[in-house]
Image (cartoon, coloured by chain):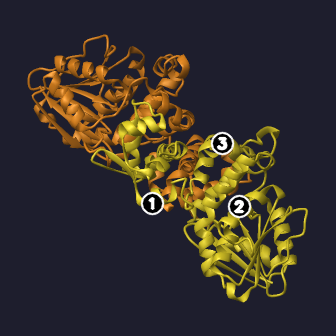
Chain colours: A yellow, B orange
Amino acid sequence: MDHIMQVGLGFWASKTLLSAVEMELFTELAQHPEGLAAIEGRLGLHPRSSRDFLDTLVALGFLERRDGKYYNTPSTDFFLDKRKPSYIGGILEMANQRLYPFWNHLTVALRTGEQQNESKGGGPSFFAALYADPARLKQFLGAMTGLSHGANLAIAAKFPWSKYKSAVDVGTAQGDLVTQVALAHPHLAGIGFDLAEVAPIFEEYVARNNLSSRVAFHPGSFFTDPLPRADVVMMGHILHDWNLEEKKLLIRKAHEALPAGGALVVYESIIDDDRSRNAFGLMMSLNMLIETPGGFDYTGADCQGWMKEAGFRETRVEHLIGPDSMVVGIK
Amino acid sequence: MDHIMQVGLGFWASKTLLSAVEMELFTELAQHPEGLAAIEGRLGLHPRSSRDFLDTLVALGFLERRDGKYYNTPSTDFFLDKRKPSYIGGILEMANQRLYPFWNHLTVALRTGEQQNESKGGGPSFFAALYADPARLKQFLGAMTGLSHGANLAIAAKFPWSKYKSAVDVGTAQGDLVTQVALAHPHLAGIGFDLAEVAPIFEEYVARNNLSSRVAFHPGSFFTDPLPRADVVMMGHILHDWNLEEKKLLIRKAHEALPAGGALVVYESIIDDDRSRNAFGLMMSLNMLIETPGGFDYTGADCQGWMKEAGFRETRVEHLIGPDSMVVGIK
């Protein structure tokens, strides 16, 4: 019964944390710990419930309180201070603004199979609206980095990069994956491939990491243009956005861009083959129902099957961190 | 980082369970286990994501899947089958319909101190609208029973009932507290006190438990009428709905209704005195921000102080189950 209530009312804890991120509480407290009155003033909190709000965050393990002052925990200080490069709050900002209200319509989505975001009922597609607005695009791409940074480090560490000389990251966004791979492996040349609108955001991120001489941006659409050639093609959080035919097309295009012996690395929250353990991967697939016309997440076995069908001779699944795994296909 | 993401996106798991309760999936599977196609047909699920939905519930521990058929777990079969008296899903139905969308406005509530439910911006009060609609009232009162049943059993077991002959439950709703106390203690006479609209719902519940000869309904408003006299006055999930002055008034009225030696039993998710551990109690207080003009939850020390101020000579706090405790005052 406790598990039922805890999950059923779990949106309370979720929304409390999301509001704290929205109000930049952790960024504020990263400057210095503060008492109740100071926080009320800085964040514009009404005194009726400010103490309940902060003490909830203490009880949930996101703040500490000592001698009447509130402090970030080491984890919230590292991951939720907007001024630190380790900030992962972009995905939570997006969850707060968009996903929380869209998920209110989950039952309708489950009954109709139709997306429930900005595009609902024939509105402009989320991606079209996003790419037309540089500020929103930058926020979204930052959110994607927050969601993938840990896995990007794991790919840089676990994949046998010494065998390869070049890598292209398809749908690169801010470029964190190719950045982490290039930082860890100075012999590699990297390409970030994405729509032209992404160029300034990518180039700023790469320059900040002193990689402009080895990592370049290549503009294009992965549906209408050929993919840039490289020894390794990477696709992180790309395939799940698309329907089965589109997924297979992208895998075929990756195969075409690779030399014999080259590798395709697909990664996201790959669902376990029994579809009974990776709850996050399964819910990410429900999120694709909310967000896209035909996208879905999939198991390692599913992806290995599609790779084999496209001509890859060898495939394997390897766990990265948390809910994320990579599926590797060798041409 | 995993804890931040798990809580920040925790509304995914929450809403998945709430949609399953809304569609009466567990009530359906309590009849007999079913395969994917049968469930799609019975619930009207679109095939695009029905398997993701059901497998998410497996991965979250709310369903089991064996040989392609889905089964309730022992816990969801007992607590989430609408046809069983042990059903606690009423509170989750209400969370799905009302609280989830209202909590989307938590940040506004925290900045203004104003409620964010049906009454927002001067709409009719939630309680007024509720009591005017018998079907909604019955659903709400069932939700309250779901939320309190476990604690009601604990009060029946832990309080020294042999010392007392009569008990009145103030704001009794469906009457589960006085019902459980009377079932466990055949020497007691019980009264349920609530607005007149509640009478038929209370009387049906008491009759179903064969207690009509010992447990009676007494109509009235706890603000405008005196409380019925009894050896024990109980208030479960009542005080947190009201502001400080109203809380103190209700405690004074309980004191007036008791004989010397009589007991006031107040219970709900009493917050720990350090306000750092009972996260559910603290979030319930934020829920009172969303739901009421001035309500809030409080610590055991807070309540003992108000009781002392009203003239109770002895007070104590005793844990019940989960997040719930009772505060007892002896006149």
| Category of crowding for the residue at label 1, using alpha-carbon neighbours closer than 10 angstroms: few (below 14), some (14–19), many (at least 20) | some
* Residue B57 to residue B224: above or below: below
The residue depicted at 77 percent of the width and 63 percent of the height is A171
The chain letter for the residue carrying disc 1 is A
Closer to the camera, B166 or A153? A153
Q: What residue type is labelled 1?
A: Ser
Q: Quadrant of residue B302?
A: top left
Q: What residue type is labelled 3?
A: Phe
Determine which of the numbered discs, if any, sits on residue A75 in the image.
1
In the image, taking residue B237 as reference, residue B229 lies left or right, namely left
The chain letter for the residue carrying disc 2 is A
- The location of residue A23, given as percent across then percent down, is 52, 42
Determine which of the numbered discs, if any, sits on residue B173 in the image.
none
In the image, taking residue A86 as reference, residue A155 lies left or right, namely right
Of marks 2 and 3, which one's residue comes earlier in the chain? 3
| Category of crowding for the residue at label 3, using alpha-carbon neighbours closer than 10 angstroms: few (below 14), some (14–19), many (at least 20) | many
Q: Is residue A267 visible?
A: no
- The location of residue B203, given as percent across then percent down, is 37, 23
Q: Do the residues labelled 2 and 3 touch (CB within 8 Å)?
A: no
Q: What residue type is labelled 2?
A: Glu
| Category of crowding for the residue at label 2, using alpha-carbon neighbours closer than 10 angstroms: few (below 14), some (14–19), many (at least 20) | some
Determine which of the numbered discs, if any, sits on residue A102 in the image.
3
Q: Distance between the residues labelled 3 and 1?
A: 28 Å
Query: Which quadrant is home to the C terminus of chain B?
Result: top left
Camera-near label (2 vs 3) is 2
- The location of residue B119, given as percent across then percent down, is 52, 21
The residue depicted at 84 percent of the width and 84 percent of the height is A259
* Residue B124 to residue B24: above or below: above
Closer to the camera, A38 or B193? A38
The residue depicted at 34 percent of the width and 14 percent of the height is B221
Q: In which quarter of the image is residue A318?
A: bottom right
Q: Mark 2 points at which residue?
A: A204
